[in-house]
Image (tube, grey):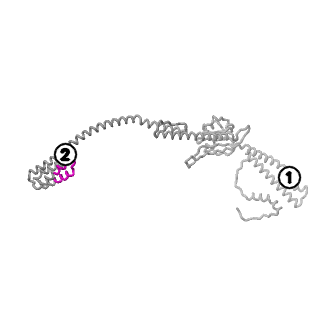
C-alpha cells in the first residue's frame, strides 16, 4: 500500500510537486517502519537514495524511472511474501482442519460417553442419597447407602452411614427409656382412684383409665382415637362431663358435684379440666396441645358433710325439749301464784329466760343451717345494718365481762 501511494505521488510530481513530495516522504517514512521481509530493507534504502537524487532534479526522467523500479521491486518482495505466507496458511489450515476433525471426533465420542454415563453416575447417587435422607427423616435409621466408588460420593456414603448408625443407636437407647416412661405414666393413670380422661387439641380421646371406664360403662377400644363429642351423643355421663369443654352460651356454669352411681352406691365427683400448654423447642410462645379431665371422688367428704348435717339436725331437735322445759320453769317462777320473788331472784329468772331464748334462737339457726345444706332452704343475701349484730354480740359477753370487772367504753368513731 505504501509503495502504491509513492508511485501515485511520482505521477503527481509534475502537477503538484509540493503535495506529491509530502505524500511520497510520508509513505516512505511509514515504509521504513514496516520492514518485515528479507531484502525489503535494502530495497527501501535504494528507494530512499534515488528519491534524494530525485528531489534535486525533479525533471530527470531517468531518476523517476529508477525510483519507480525500486518501488516495483519493493512491491514484488511483499507480494511474494504474501503469496508464500498464503501457501503456508493454506497448509496450516489444512493441517488444522485435520487436527480439529480428529480432536472434534474424539471430543464428540468422549462427550457422548459422558452424556450416557455421567448423568446416571452423578444423579443415581444423589437420588439414592436423597431417598435415604427421607428415610432418616422418617426415623427409619436402619437405612444405609452403598456407593462402589472411591470418589467424594464414597466418602459421603461412609459419613452418611456412620451418622445413620449413630442415630439408630441413639434412637434405640432413647426409645427404650421413652417406652418405659410411657408405661409408667399409663400404669399410674390406670391405677388412679379418680377417673381421668385425656384429649388432644382436636378433642380426640388419647387415654382413659379404668376408673373412668367403670363409671361410664364404656370400653377402651370404643373410645381411644374417637372424638369425645361423638361419644357424648350416646353417653349421658360423657355429655355432662364435656359441658365446660363445649360451653353453651345460654348455659350457666354448674359448680355442683356430679352424682354418679359407682362402687355399688351413689358417689359424688368434682370435675376439674386442666389445659395442657407446652413451649416447643426453639420457640417462645406456648402452644395448646390438649386437656386432661379429672373427676375427683369426694364421696367420703360428702358423706361426712351429710353426717354433720344429720348430727346438727338431731342435736337441734334434742336441744329444743330441755330449752322448752327451762322456759316453762322460768314462766312458773314468774307466776305470783306460786310465790313472790325478791329483786335478785327476779333478775336471775330474767337472765335464765334471756339465755333460754338465746339458746332457742341458736337451735333454730342450727336447724336452718341443716335445711340450707340439704337444699330445703335457699339463702338470699340482703343488705343489713351491723349495729344489731354488734349489740347481740355485746349482750352475749356482757355478763362474763362484768364478772371479770371489764368496762365497756363508748367511742364516737364510726366505720
Q: Are there few (<14), some (14-19), or many (20+) residues within 10 Å of tag 1?
A: some
Q: Is residue 403 above or below residue 169?
A: below
Main SS of the magenta segment?
helix
Q: Out of 342 and 207, give the one closest to the viewer.
A: 207
Q: Which mark is residue 155?
A: none
Please tell me which residue is depicted at 79% across the width and 64% down the height of the picture: 407
Quadrant location of the C terminus in the rendered image: bottom right
Closer to the camera, 107 or 280?
107
Q: Which residue is mark 1?
A: 326
Which residue bears the numbered disc 2?
Answer: 78
Residue 69, image x and y in percent?
A: 13, 47
Q: Secondary structure at mark 1?
A: helix
Residue 198: horizontal and vertical position, in percent? 63, 41
From which residue to which does the magenta span run? 24-45
Measure how far apart labels 1 and 2 are at the Cα level. Answer: 161 Å
Residue 145 magenta: no
- The reply to whether discs 1 and 2 touch (Cβ–Cβ < 8 Å) is no
- Point 58% across, 45% down: residue: 288
Q: Nearer the viewer, residue 415 or 134?
A: 134
Q: Is residue 291 left or right of residue 161?
A: right
- Find residue 219 and report its horizontal and vertical position in percent: 65, 35
Name the side, left or right, on which 10 lies relative to 351. Answer: left
Q: How packed is label 2: few (under 14 Cα within 10 Å), some, or many (20 or more)?
A: many
Is residue 350 or residue 334 the one in the foreground?
350
Secondary structure at numbered mark 2: helix
Nearer to us of marks 1 and 2 is 2
Q: Earlier in the sequence, mark 1 or mark 2?
A: 2
Amino acid at each position: 500500500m505504501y509503495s502504491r501511494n509513492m508511485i501515485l505521488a511520482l505521477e503527481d510530481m509534475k502537477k503538484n510537486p509540493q503535495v506529491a513530495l509530502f505524500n511520497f516522504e510520508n509513505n516512505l517514512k511509514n515504509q521504513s517502519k514496516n520492514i518485515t521481509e528479507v531484502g525489503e530493507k535494502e530495497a527501501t534504502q535504494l528507494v530512499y537514495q534515488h528519491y534524494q537524487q530525485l528531489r534535486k532534479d525533479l525533471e530527470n526522467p531517468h531518476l523517476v524511472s529508477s525510483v519507480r523500479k525500486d518501488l516495483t521491486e519493493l512491491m514484488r518482495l511483499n507480494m511474494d511474501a504474501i503469496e508464500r505466507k498464503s501457501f503456508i496458511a493454506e497448509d496450516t489450515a489444512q493441517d488444522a482442519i485435520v487436527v480439529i476433525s480428529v480432536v472434534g471426533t474424539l471430543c464428540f465420542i468422549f462427550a457422548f460417553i459422558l452424556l450416557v454415563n455421567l448423568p446416571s453416575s452423578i444423579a443415581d447417587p444423589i437420588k439414592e442419597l436423597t431417598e435415604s435422607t427421607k428415610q432418616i427423616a422418617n426415623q427409619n435409621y436402619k437405612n444405609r447407602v452403598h456407593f462402589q466408588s472411591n470418589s467424594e460420593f464414597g466418602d459421603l456414603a461412609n459419613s452418611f452411614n456412620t451418622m445413620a448408625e449413630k442415630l439408630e443407636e441413639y434412637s434405640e437407647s432413647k426409645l427404650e427409656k421413652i417406652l418405659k416412661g410411657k408405661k409408667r405414666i399409663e400404669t399410674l393413670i390406670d391405677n388412679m382412684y379418680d377417673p381421668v380422661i385425656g384429649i388432644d387439641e382436636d378433642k380426640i380421646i388419647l387415654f382413659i383409665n379404668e376408673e373412668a371406664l367403670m363409671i361410664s360403662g364404656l370400653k377402651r377400644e370404643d373410645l381411644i382415637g374417637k372424638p369425645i363429642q361423638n361419644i357424648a351423643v350416646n353417653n349421658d355421663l360423657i355429655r355432662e362431663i364435656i359441658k365446660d369443654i363445649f360451653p353453651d352460651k345460654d348455659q350457666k356454669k354448674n359448680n355442683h358435684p356430679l352424682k354418679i352411681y359407682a362402687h355399688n352406691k351413689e358417689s359424688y365427683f368434682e370435675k376439674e379440666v386442666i389445659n395442657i400448654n407446652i413451649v416447643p423447642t426453639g420457640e417462645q410462645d406456648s402452644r395448646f396441645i390438649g386437656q386432661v379431665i379429672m373427676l375427683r371422688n369426694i364421696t367420703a367428704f360428702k358423706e361426712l358433710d351429710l353426717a354433720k348435717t344429720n348430727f346438727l339436725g338431731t342435736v337441734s331437735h334434742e336441744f329444743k325439749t330441755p330449752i322448752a322445759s327451762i322456759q316453762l320453769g322460768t314462766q312458773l317462777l314468774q307466776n305470783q301464784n306460786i310465790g313472790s320473788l325478791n329483786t335478785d331472784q327476779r333478775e336471775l329468772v330474767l337472765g335464765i329466760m334471756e339465755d333460754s331464748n338465746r339458746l332457742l334462737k341458736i337451735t333454730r339457726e342450727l336447724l336452718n343451717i341443716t335445711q340450707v345444706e340439704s337444699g330445703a332452704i335457699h339463702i338470699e343475701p340482703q343488705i343489713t345494718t351491723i349495729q344489731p349484730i354488734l349489740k347481740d354480740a355485746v349482750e352475749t359477753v356482757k355478763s362474763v365481762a362484768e364478772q371479770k370487772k371489764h368496762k365497756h367504753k363508748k367511742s364516737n368513731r364510726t366505720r
